[in-house]
Structure formats: structure tokens, C-alpha cells
Image (tube, rainbow, N blue to C red):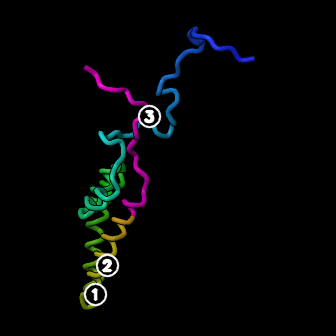
Amino acid sequence: MLEYTDAPSTSTPVTAAETADPAQLGRLETAEGKASDAVAVLLSVLPGLGHIYKGHRLIGLLLLFAGTPMAVALALLIATGTAGFGIGLLPVYWVAVMVHVYAIQDRVVTPEVEEGEEY
């Protein structure tokens, strides 16, 4: 038999930190709560910036300072042996970075509890 009562419950309240997914702890938060895929793709005009925006800092910095210079150098090297056609590899690299940043999950966490406004 179930009884209705106005008495407070005897269980302790559960905090948001206790219910949070352990994989989400320590992730970034934005005002919107979620990174935009379209903005990330637009930022990837400079490869790596979209990854940084979505919270993948290490991958973004590696693409920005190591991957892109190596891709340019490799394309120029290949272009010397293919009458310039090796330069066509750069747009392939650029599009691949944009597709990757569109497909990866955000490391930005959506707020789970609405805390309301503070006065």
C-alpha cells in the first residue's frame, strides 16, 4: 500500500557532480553548452582551429603547427616530380580536416541542471 505524505524524504539529495558521467568530468563548457559543427568547419579554413573550438586542443595544435606544414612540404615535393599536379593534394588535406572536425564529438558538456538566474 502506498501512502501520501508531506513529510520530507529521509534520503540525502544527490548533487550534479555525483550523477555526472565520469567521462564528462573536466570537459569544457560554453555559454550555449554545445559547439557548433558549422562554426568548427568554418574555423577549419585554418586547419586545427575547428578542433580547438570543439575542445580537442592537442589534435588542433598538432594540425596547426605540425600537420599543415608537413602537408604543404609534402605537396610541394610531390609537385616537383609531377609537373605541379601534387599541389592538388592540399585541397584533399584541407577537406579531410574539415570532414574530421565535423564528424568528431564535442568535448563541450551541456549543462545538466538549470540553476536559474542569480540576483
Nearest to the observer: residue 69 or residue 102: 102
Q: What is the CA distance from the residue labelled 1 to the residue labelled 3?
A: 51 Å
Amino acid at the residue labelled 3: Glu
Which mark's residue is nearer the viewer, 1 or 3?
3
Q: Residues within 10 Å of mark 3 (few under 14, many from 20)?
A: few
Where in the figure is residue 6, as x and y percent of width and height?
Answer: 57, 10
- For residue 118, which numbered disc appears in the image? none
Disc 1 marks which residue?
A: 85
Say which label, 1 or 3, has the lower sequence index.
Answer: 1
Residue at 25% over, 79% down: 76
- For residue 112, which numbered disc appears in the image? 3
Say which label, 2 or 3, has the lower sequence index.
Answer: 2
Q: Main secondary structure of the magenta part?
A: loop
Q: Answer left or right for 35 relative to 3.
A: left
Q: Answer left or right for 106 relative to 40.
A: right
Nearest to the observer: residue 27 or residue 102: 102
Hey, which residue is sitting farthest top in the picture?
A: 7
- For residue 89, which numbered disc appears in the image? 2
Magenta stretch, residue numbers: 100-119
Quadrant of the rendered image containing residue 88: bottom left
Helix or strand or loop: what does disc 1 sit on?
helix
Residue at 43% over, 53% down: 105
